[in-house]
Image (spheres, rainbow, N blue to C red):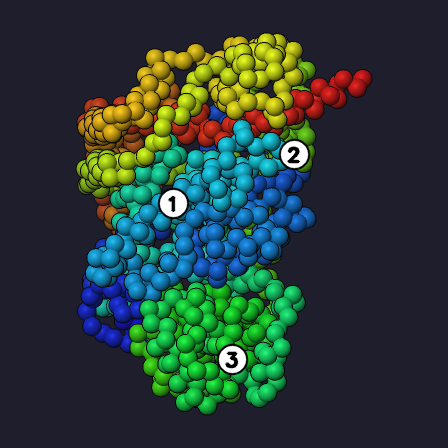
Amino acid sequence: MLLSRTRSNAAGHIAIDDGLKKQITSVGEDGRFELCFHDDAGSLATWCKNLQETSKRVQTNPCSVPGICRRKSTGGFCPPLNIAILIVGSRGDVQPFIPIAQLLSKPPYGHRVRICTHPAFKDFVESQGVEFFNIGGDPEALMSYMVRNPGLVPSRKSVRAGDIGKRRAEMWEIINRAWRGCIEAGDGMGDPVRATDVENVEDLFLADAIIANPPSIAHIHCAEKLGVPLHMVFTMPFSPTTAFPHPLASMNYSGADAKTANYLSFIMMELLMWQGLGDLINKFRRQKLGLDPISVMWGFQLLSRLRVPFTYLWPESLIPKPPDWGKHIEVVGYSFLPLAKSYTPPPDLTAFLEKGPRPIYIGFGSIVVEDPDAFSELLFKAVKIAGVRAIISRGWSGVGDKCRITEDVYLIDNCPHDWLFQHVSAVVHHGGAGTTAAGIAAGRPTVIVPFFGDQPFWGQMIARSGAGPDPIPFKSLTAENLAESISVALTPSVQEAAKRMAEDIADENGAEAMAKSFQEQIGLDQFECEICPGRLATHRHKKTGTRLSGLAVACLVDRGVIQPAELELIRRKNWYVDEGAEHPLVGLAAAFTGPMGDVATATFDYSHALRYRPKHTKVEDRRPSWIDPWATDNSTNGSVGSNVASPNRRINPTTFSTREMELYAHKIARRSLKTNNADIDTLIRQPSLYDKQKAAWHARERGRNGQLFYLTRATGRYAVELTKVGLKAPVAFFYNIANGFHNYPSCGYAGVEVRRRDQIIDFETGLVAAAKEFTLGIWDAFSGVIILPYKSVHEEGAKGLGKGVWRGSKGFFSNLGAWAPPPGRLCGLLERRRLGGSQYSERPRSWVISHTFVFTTDINLVREYHSTF
């Protein structure tokens, strides 16, 4: 279903008319989902309104961990941070982030910024002076897949060809490598680099903040694990709004309220994405991050529910900011990477431009078509019919490589758009956000031939502004209608409209505005050391709440002012991702779908392990991880153990062995390093029975009957996983049902805000939360019967009495219902108990080790300082 025309009714509201009035099918020819709504959508409208109000009530305190007090910033200065930018997409998705990274790397910001994206863009990113990290994935293969399957649902042909498995495997690689990009040194092109193997402390990388585009998927989960701020940046609308529908949705309102339908389209698109990737996300959370899985019943709205800061890179003159987007969402304009000054055109291109009238540009960039030869012939024919000269980009499809080139056509490879578009009269392209922005900035009329994704949306925005004709979907493209659109684009009225748009955005600098927005949103008071201004705070003093840098900690510990046991590592942002089910029935559904998903994941992993058993070479005696690293080693000079055991041994991270550093990190993480000269002998862990049995078993797997032992281990692991699911199933049942009752008053007709449950981070806080829930739940149940009707009458008069009575009665039964199954809350505590170990106390190993490096290095600096006096 195609969008035929658009109109703007008011500032911030874009109404899109549908040219077709047929009933809903599933996926249109352009890949967008056709959403049809009933005429009577009153209940949906009420639910939509309640959902919007709920998202506005989410707390945005950067750190709400119990027991942590916040202090005012000493001067509003943000010390240099490590910032990871996660990007998944084509070059047009990557390029706008490069000027942002460059700005954040320079004064007055001075951060260390790395762009984590596909290896195909490594040279491009590094050529702009920006650090790169490889997150895997092949964008060319992804573009080819998207052209064949323009929607979220693949075709039967792709299913039979095994494309789904390939894309899921690629996304699994991207998600895992994105996590590595947040915590690992190096560029990610080789094997994983352990922090303890890095010789230079300055090479270590641990993200203090994350910037990402939504398709990178791992963003919020990595930020939750690290406890750092997250800032989303995108080139197309992704936040729910009533002003216009999701770019991937083709709307058939059927008389329903347009605002409600628009808002729901965003939710439905995210839900569809979660249906396809939710199991991978939860597997990543559980296996790689050590976090609890999120139910697919409510995990698809994390970004909007948590009010994650969003910055959109388009001008408000093209799409005004909707009035229902909060202050955490900004529209700042395009982010351009200037490449024209460094580009020197080849002589034959210069000669072609000077030979005749200005040509048009035709290019489809990263789009990969199935039949490039037929596509080339179509383009050449359209140029001939339109009677124009053309510069045609070969792109990833290799357009024109096997065609006879006429004198009116010039084939070009990679060329900066900001240079090339200044020398053409109009541009024809696929409607990517980056190319669309370049055409607008150059003031050139634009003809868009959308293939998939947000491209139809940008085609409609260009047509609405008058800077180009209506878009031509790729599947409807012919030489005749393309030639006609080119002729329309060259008319004076369209050219004038394009020039006006260029003038409107001439003074905008989206990259600079994004950098300022990022600085304002991350919370500067969470980063600066209060003792040593200008240094990054890494620890917090438990008693006073003072934020301390590594150097401050080293000085205070060295002088005996504080003890390491009095410190805790800072979590600058606490992402509360699991508020639970909003309705008892949703909780019931989650109680069943969760265990079923765990069984399916365990079964898939078991079958995969059987099919792809690792091939071991001959026995290769690796040193088990539990062997004492300080024992005397005859292969080294002297006795290592005697040197290390010395209480006066200087702590030097560059000479520490991997095992030494791990043990030190372990001690610091447990807050048990009493002095900075701790006796190393106390850190040595003797091999346990489990260690010995594990080493012996792996040795058997490399032996004669290794396959049998491997099969036994894989089967045993599968049985253990199924047992865990069986034991957790009743716990999940009671926990989800209790949450459903707790949150029920906030949903449906006349929803009322419910008291937000304290986050459970360990068993102790879980007991406190349970006691608080029980006491306040009883109070809310009985007091609400009186207070809620009174408030409704006070606010709305007599007509609010019925609404207040309904609110009170619903709150009465739901608050008591949350404790209807007596073991509900206690089982919930057991369900959440693991958070205390995985999410807060046991930091990621690379994270702890990185801080250990800095900590021990600062101690040595202090000692060297004292030794000079």
The quarter of the picture where residue 686 lies is top left
Left or right of 601 on screen, residue 234:
right
Q: Mark 2 sits on what residue?
A: 535
Measured along the vertical axis of the image, is residue 45 above or below residue 370? above
Q: Mark 3 sits on what residue?
A: 410
Question: Residue at horizontal 46%, vertical 30%?
Answer: 844
Among the two numbered marks 1 and 3 on one chain, the one whose residue lies closer to the N terminus: 1
Q: Nearer the viewer, mark 1 or mark 3?
A: 3
Q: Nearer the viewer, mark 2 or mark 1?
A: 1
Badge 1 element: helix
Badge 1 density bin: few <14, some 14–19, many ≥20, Cα 10 Å: some
Amino acid on which disc 1 is placed? Glu
Left or right of 349 on screen, residue 489:
left
Q: Position of residue 129 (x, y in %)?
A: 62, 52
Residue that lies at the very extreme toward the right in this rendered image: 869
Amino acid on which disc 3 is placed? Tyr
Badge 3 element: strand
The quarter of the picture where residue 367 lies is bottom left
Q: Position of residue 607 (x, y in %)?
A: 22, 38
Measured along the vertical axis of the image, is residue 285 above or below residue 562? below
Using the rendered image of the protein, determine whether residue 235 is visible from the camera's viewpoint. yes
Badge 2 density bin: few <14, some 14–19, many ≥20, Cα 10 Å: many
Q: Mark 1 sits on what residue?
A: 173
Q: Position of residue 603 (x, y in %)?
A: 21, 37
Amino acid on which disc 2 is placed? Arg
